[in-house]
Amino acid sequence: MLSYLVNYLPENKDIKGTYSEPFVGGGSVFFNMNSKNALISDLNSELITLYKGIKLYPHKVWETFETFPEGKTAYYKIRNTVIKNKPLYYRAARTLFLNRTCFKGMWRHNRKGNFNVGYGGEERRWVITHQNIRLV
């Protein structure tokens, strides 16, 4: 979709002030714009936690992500972990882990506000590398 949208986006040199993206999602437009002065946001607070964690602690996010065990039982244990008092880098790594190992990368919460997508396997997990995290 980005290859279609890019034809309608302004060039970096034409953006005066701050580039603002209110629904960043996966960030494809944001990363394509490569703006020097940008503001991103999203309704999904866990997604914003992921971006903040990667920005501030890229190595700790990766190191934590790497330590999460594989398999369905581990997935549900990590998914059900109470994260309220966990450090930012842990919360970010957990969001990345859930996104990469849940069913087709879906993101959904139940009425209590808890992430509740089922396990989808490990195939998508290791597509992400430490280098990717550093580049973000």
Image: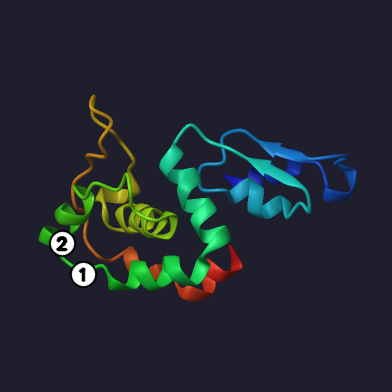
Judge whether 67 appears above or below 5 on screen.
below
User: At 72% across and 50% down in the image, what residue appears?
Assistant: 33
Left or right placement of residue 119 versus residue 109 in this view: left
User: At 83% across and 47% down in the image, what residue appears?
Assistant: 11
Relative depth, front residue between 60 and 125:
60
Left or right placement of residue 106 versus residue 57 in this view: left
Q: Which residue is mark 2?
A: 74
Secondary structure type for disc 1 = loop
Q: Position of residue 45 (x, y in %)?
A: 45, 38
Relative depth, front residue between 29 and 53:
53
Amino acid on which disc 2 is placed: Ala
Mark 1 to mark 2: distance in Å?
6 Å
Q: Position of residue 17 (x, y in %)?
A: 85, 39
Q: Which residue is mark 1?
A: 69
Left or right placement of residue 10 versus residue 25 in this view: right
Secondary structure type for disc 2 = helix
Residue most extreme to the top = 111
Q: Which circle's residue, 1 or 2, is located before the other in the chain?
A: 1
Q: Quadrant of the C terminus?
A: bottom right
